[in-house]
Amino acid sequence: MTTSPASGPNTDAQEEIARLRVEIEQHNYRYYVEDAPVISDAEYDALMRRLMALEQAHPELVTPESPTQRVGATPLAAFGAVTHAVPMLSLGNAFDEDEVRAFDKRVTDTLRAAGLLGPAAQADYFCELKLDGLAISLRYENGKLVQAATRGDGQTGEDVTANIRTIRSIPLQLKAGAPEVLEVRGEVLMNRRDFERLNEAQAARGDKVFVNPRNAAAGSLRQLDPRITAQRPLRFFAYGWGEVHGLAGRQSGLFDEPAPGKREVSTLPREAHSAMLAWLGELGLPINTQHNHKAKGADGLLAFYERVAGLRPVLPYDIDGVVYKVDSLPAQKVLGFVARAPRFALAHKYPAEEATTTLLDIEVQVGRTGAITPVARLQPVFVGGVTVTNATLHNEDEVRRKDVRIGDTVIVRRAGDVIPEVVGPVLAKRPADAREFRMVTACPVCGSAIERPEGEAVARCTGGLFCAAQRKQSLLHAAGRKALDIEGLGEKLVDQLVDRDRVKSLADIYSLTAEELAGYERMGAKSAENLVRAIDKARTPTLGRLLFALGIRHVGESTARDVARHFGSLEAIMNATEAQLLEVTDVGPAVAASIHRFFAEQHNRDIVHALEEQGVRPSAEAGARTGALTGKTFVLTGTLPNWTRDDATRHILAAGGKVSGSVSKKTAYVVAGEEAGSKLAKAQELGVPVLDEDGLKQLLGVDE
Ligand code: IVH
């Protein structure tokens, strides 16, 4: 910031410019670091426009630190080389608990031997996320950003200053209290949502799409034209520092003792990594305060690892592990370095979510609603903690868009419990004889025509329940846990029942006997009896479950429950008009039309009647239409002290509430018990109120 002279023709403009710069950078911080903007984009633009106008009128007042100067206008010919004043090191890796315990033991033994840790004391660590982006070093001199460099080989990196300046969360000017020289080390990354949007825009323009956020971040930073980088949604988090000296006009290295006769520099935190990071935060640098965490001993580290594993799917960005750092800086100094990694820090990695393998073939699968899904058959590959042999390719357009061909080396991704998918081909490894996928024109199972309505991405087999594949999938859906919950009616048995034509529709399930079932492959007398008992129990499902079991398109578990509650009987639902269906809360036109169309088909009505003949009598759906919790959606997570999940669900439904599996802004309450994981985190992130068991009981007015 420029200091304003006491008087002069420009004083007013100068003051306003200074004020606007601070204000704009504060909004950048709120928007890009805290994800909590307090003004609209239009208001922000107005501030920027005002600043630009003032600077245009007073060009002598423009400084490189002005937010108007983030984007340089001239592309570079090439990146220059930067020698790092302090090398950028890498980290030792651990992949399992034993390796973490061994690390903690080495640290503890060394620190005890050095007298820095008592005989029974545990080491204090600072735990961070291992952000999956690119390491960057930012050099500030007297508080101004003067240079930014990539890690390169650790000794020498590339000068990416012009590009780094376009990242709004990186201050061009530090707040008061910055030393003469401060090198900040951290990670540049792209949020997953931003990455997806960027790829959509790239694809729409016919430009290259990126395979993952890391790749997109790297590609964006290595643009010779900073105007392109400026349009890419890059973010930054600081996690360390390199060269630091000259605080308050004095020369002092971070670890150096103050020169004899000189006082200790009081504002430079020399004690702990955590204090140092907090100080960087105070200077205006983005720090991951939300997830950074202090821990004690190996157990503390492992608990952090587990907790973050649960958060990983809901984090806005990719991480590939967590990093443990001995918090005490004097202790770090004693531990020192081995080769190119510090002995005081460790990266504990999660199973990679992406791997490459060979695409052996693309086959098609017929789903419950006839949807034809291309499925990649893969050379088995270990990814996301399991061996993957198949991965979905979603639909024909997706295969074309990704340009994957049979024989390609492909990137396979499996994140959390999400089904594995093929991300894209590694074009450099494409063999000359790679084959393009051709969509089938007839159903591979029943031979019926395949239809792909205009404007829809999904091709469907027109065979309906004539198609054995659709019949099998429908039966498996109906037997599922959220529908009729018939334990023991699995894929192998359904295959046999349909292939032998013993079961043509859901109703036929109810006529199966233990004697005949015992004759099927992989069925003993005992399991046959158990199955018949489970089938018998499924004669009295709740109305909502039965409706869900019918597998009507667009009718999920909770819609089925709403419709069941509203109408009270299957007869009433079957005879409802679209307008009447639309009266149900949360039922929109697509759902109403789909239910109406389903029951307009005689063969579907026949199935309902056949079910009645088999003695299927749904019970009224629990939950009065106007209970205390009507319209409120709950999400349950973790283990409650007294109630099971079913108990809690039953009570909530009985009071008119709904239970959903995922937390969104519309969730009224999250009920959290022991070991609640990502859903609790999501609730906190979205500001959804969280209840414990007692809180829920209070709300329900029950005392059990
Ligand atoms: S500390 C001397 N902390 O991981 C240790 N690194 O293999 C310097 N990374 O290249 C690294 N998140 O890009 C550290 N919280 C974090 C990190 C982190 C990601 C990356 C960094 C580095 C690599 C180390």
Image: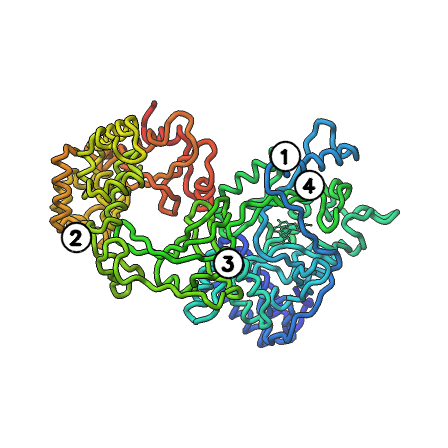
Q: Amino acid at mark 3?
A: Asn
In percent of the image, x 60 and y 43: which residue is there?
348
Closest to the observer: 363 or 68? 363
Q: Please say whether residue 482 is visible from this viewpoint.
A: no
Q: Give the Cα separation between the discs numbered 1 and 2.
A: 60 Å
Closest to the observer: 277 or 618? 618
Q: Is residue 258 rendered to the left or right of residue 185? A: right
Q: What x and y, as percent, mark residue 394?
A: 36, 56
Q: Give the Cα separation between the discs numbered 1 and 3.
A: 32 Å
- Disc 2 vs disc 4: which is toward the camera? 2
For disc 4, the marked residue is 326
The quadrant where residue 225 appears? bottom right
Proximity of marks 2 and 4: CB atoms separated by less than 8 Å: no
Q: What x and y, as percent, mark residue 506?
A: 20, 41
- Disc 3 vs disc 4: which is toward the camera? 3
Q: Is residue 400 rendered to the left or right of residue 588? A: right
What SS does tag 1 mark?
helix
Q: In the displayed image of the protein, which residue is found farthest to the right?
A: 260
Q: Amino acid at mark 1?
A: Ala
Sequence order check, earlier mark of 2 and 3: 3
Sequence order check, earlier mark of 2 and 4: 4
What SS does tag 4 mark?
strand
Sequence order check, earlier mark of 4 and 1: 1
Closest to the observer: 347 or 326? 347
For disc 2, the marked residue is 597
- Disc 4 vs disc 1: which is toward the camera? 1
Q: Residues within 10 Å of mark 4 (few under 14, many from 20)?
A: many
Q: Give the Cα separation between the discs numbered 2 and 3.
A: 41 Å
Does residue 38 lie above or below 516 as drawn?
Answer: below
Q: Amino acid at mark 2?
A: Arg
